[in-house]
Amino acid sequence: MGGVNPAGRTSGHQAFRRTVLDALSDDDQASTLLGLAAMMRLADCQADGAWHDAEGRPLDAAGIVEQTRQQVLDHTLIRRIEDPRFNEEGLPANRKASLALDTPLTFRIRRRQLPDDLPPTWQVKELDRQSLEVTVPAGTMEVMLPETRPAQVRAAGQLPSGFEPSRLYRSVHHPRGLSMTVFAASDCLGDSGLEWDGLRDRLDPDEVAVYAGNSIGQLDDEGWGGLLKSFVSGKRATSKQMPLGYGQMPADFINAYVLGSVGGTGAALGACASFLYNLRLGVDDIRAGRRRVVLVGTADAPITPEVIEGFRTMGALADDDGLKALDALELLTDADYQRACRPFARNCGFTMGESSQFIMLMDDALALETGAEVLGSVPGVFVNADGWKRSISAPGIGNYISLAKGAALVRDMLGEKALRERTFLHAHGTSTPKNRITESHVFDQVARAHGITAWPVVAVKAFVGHSQGSAAGDQLTSALGSFAHGLLPGIFTLDAVADDVHAERLKLFRDPLPFVADAAFINAKGFGGNNATGVVLSPAVTERLMAQRHGETAMAAWQMRREATREVAAAFHRAADRGHFEVRYRFGEGVLEGPELDVGRDAIRIPGYAQEVSLAVDNPFGRLDEGEA
């Protein structure tokens, strides 16, 4: 797994550890804070292992942790938006106005700034080669007056301050979401401990796939955001904004610049359930035998004035007025913004977040052959729509079906006792009043059906916010952290469970909870009726299932091969914890256009790829005799 969100880097469970920080040992707390300080450029580790603070002064690791601790805590997770436009500077805007001119108005303007199509009553006089004088007669003149507007939403889950993924490789005007994609995919490859080119050489190139996208495309100025407002802002559209804005572009970037893959590709967009939609594509491909390795992920960077305003006008976001009303405050402090997201408590809306998360799926036989680390397994992802609706954005009935199917699968695989006592829920948990009622009712009904009396509920959005299509990626990677550390993150903003939450059979808690789990349910409820529930099994359960299928001898050989994988991954983690990131971005390398291929009847050989592409295809439809065709 790999990625980045407001809690930090995904690999090595760094982001997870940030969400359970107080429950960790002193050593684990220190290493987590030190790694975040390096990531945020508050400290630097030299090649010889010596640390220096941001001013270049030498300090030991303990000194760095002590010096930067509060800054790291204050500038990770949900907090006041750090973009100056959301604070004193104000959001740039224009206001339409009609000017009543009592007398003619004369002004000077550069020739290239004057519109081509002028009102017929305007008089233009040339002053020199660059300048013109324009006279507008008395009367009414329609204009747009520039202004700044105070932001009404000032909290979001932002990447750790000081971390800019675009600085880590040769990024040329890439939208933020795509820079996050390149970092996250690279982080995933490094975390695997496997050398990608060597892994690829084992496989038919068509046995690899990438399913990655996002919820709403790239809507910052480098993508469709800049394109769509180029005319009204007086700026030129660029040749990159249109292609780089597409929602499937994270997959395209990984194929073209990270993996060099010619295998399966695509992106399934399903609002807040997009990560799970893409996960289902990967799981189905592997179960069907079409692919052996699939990189699955999403990347969303929606913290822009326009996107936030769109969600605010829907009444979906926790704005300043709503937060003040919740706590009867006249003024909001930084501490209040850090508590903006309150799943299953009294709340007033969700908090926007940004994130990119990727996981590498692999069939179990290949995992054994390569000595891959097993962080868990995904036996199924269930997706169901809501049926008839009034409001397209309101929740409906589909999530009852998707979660109930997930629970039935776990019961069938692991038994009733495991389902009741050794599973937990990773709630969508958006922090809206509607979500706390409807999602808790889904949980309650499924719990009743299976006799579950105290189902633990994790709601990681309390820490990182709602990253739209990447939200379930945040949940899944957090669940993998829980398997590794035996801890469930608490809902630290949960002062009290709201009265309308169906909590009788749920376990809702504030502090990290020690818990040994066999399985987790990753739940998503997306706008439009996009419901999905993914089942993820723990590494311990997964290894038992693998042993049942492949035998103890094969498992022992895998464990020996895994030692080398773990050593490589550990070296990657040590470097990353020192702020030395290995971003894989291969622009313009090995480009092929077609004539280089050797195309045969049964296979295609591609220069640079060790294995040929088999053209043997599955035909379930039967065959006609040539005389009948």
Image: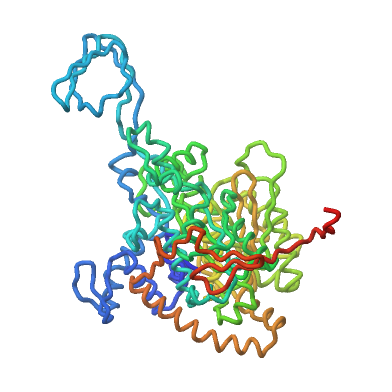
Quarter location, residue 102: top left
- 52 up-or-down from 7: above or below: below
Residue 494 visible to an observer of this rendering: no
Quarter location, residue 304: top left
Left/right placement of residue 157 relative to residue 543 reads: left
Q: Residue furthest left?
A: 128
How far across and down, in percent of the image, does residue 152 sit? 40, 40
How far across and down, in percent of the image, does residue 192 sit? 50, 74
Viewer-proximal residue among 127 and 385: 127
How far across and down, in percent of the image, does residue 229 sit? 39, 36
Residue 377 visible to an observer of this rendering: yes
For the rendered model, the colour scheme is rainbow
Left/right placement of residue 106 relative to residue 578 reads: left
Viewer-proximal residue among 99 and 106: 106
Viewer-proximal residue among 305 and 457: 305
Q: Residue at x 18, y 22 (%)?
A: 132
